[in-house]
Image: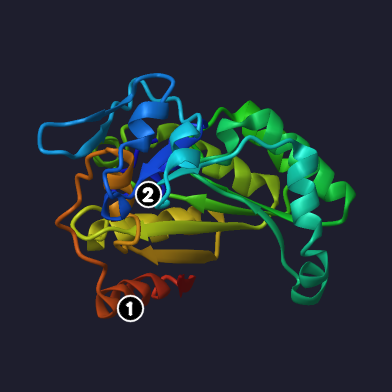
Amino acid sequence: MECLWCCNPESQTINPKLFYFESRCTRCQHCVSVCPNGAISVHADGSIKTNRNLCNACGTCVEACPNEARAISGELKTVYEVLEVVKKDSLFYRNSGGGVTASGGEPTSQPKFLLALFQACSRSGFHTCLDTCGYVSWEVLEHALEYTDLVLYDIKHMDPKRHIELTGVDNELILQNAGRVAKNGIPLVIRVPLIPGCNDSKENMEALAKYAIKLGVREINLLPYHELGVNKYERLGMKYDLAATNSFQKNRAEAIKGDIERYNLEVTII
């Protein structure tokens, strides 16, 4: 999916992405001369521009930049390498009761890696949590659930047409999979991003609460919209369609929380 409010646009594809911090750039042009793909050029006003169609995020310009105006987001890792990072916090997991959460982006977009990682975590005795949007084939999701201890399940909107407008896809498969996960018996928490003017209507929240009850889900997390990801779009050379949207008001989030709690559901604002 490509949600309008996505705060991690760099994770919408599985390839590493180049961040460009223009405020740090001194226009020394080192990046222009070293780019092996000719993706970086100097415009008439002296500004440095990157052709994203030519850039493959090789990192050559990052190494050449003396001002840290460029950075690569995303790394290629093996399951073993990730597991070694996970093991460093094993003491914390035991003391806190926590574990490993696969999030994103969408972790099921790399299904073989996700399955292998969760298998390795299970063998090591680590609690596993899958944070998913649910827009994935049931075959992939079902396999991952075999090694999943908790599911955080995003539901962006209950209306299919509005869901398409906000995310680029309808919600039929998402709701189908939510029902399947609920029947699977794995602890399930529904998570809802609260986006002003997009999905925070009373009608949508009521429909969501009723759907949760239908599934037998008792816990809902509300994630109020924030502006922390806005600058990423500029650094990635992407347009942000919600640039004029302000962070979700705390009192509004509390009011929605109260409305959902009237259905005897446990609601937490994250």
User: Given the image, on which type of amino acid does mark 1 rest?
Assistant: Glu
Tell me the crowding category of disc 1: few under 14, some 14 to 19, or many 20 or more residues within 10 angstroms, Cα based.
Answer: some
Q: At 69% across and 45% down in the image, what residue appears?
A: 184
Instruction: Please name the residue that numbered disc 2 is placed on.
Output: 69
- In the image, taking residue 16 as reference, residue 237 lies left or right, namely left
Choose the circle earlier in sequence order: 2 or 1.
2
Return the x and y of residue 147 as percentages of the image width and height: 77, 44
- Taking 189 as reference, is 250 left or right? left
* Circles 2, 1 touching at the beta carbon (< 8 Å): no
| Residue that lies at the very extreme toward the left in this rendered image | 45
Image location of residue 220, percent across then percent down: 48, 64
Residue name at image x 35 percent, y 78 percent: 258
- Label 1 secondary element: helix
Would you call the spot at circle 2 few (<14 residues within 10 Å), some (14-19), or many (20 or more)?
some
Q: Image check: 59 left or right of 86?
A: left
Q: Which residue is mark 1?
A: 254
Of helix, strand and loop, which one carries label 2? Answer: loop
Q: Is residue 217 visible?
A: yes
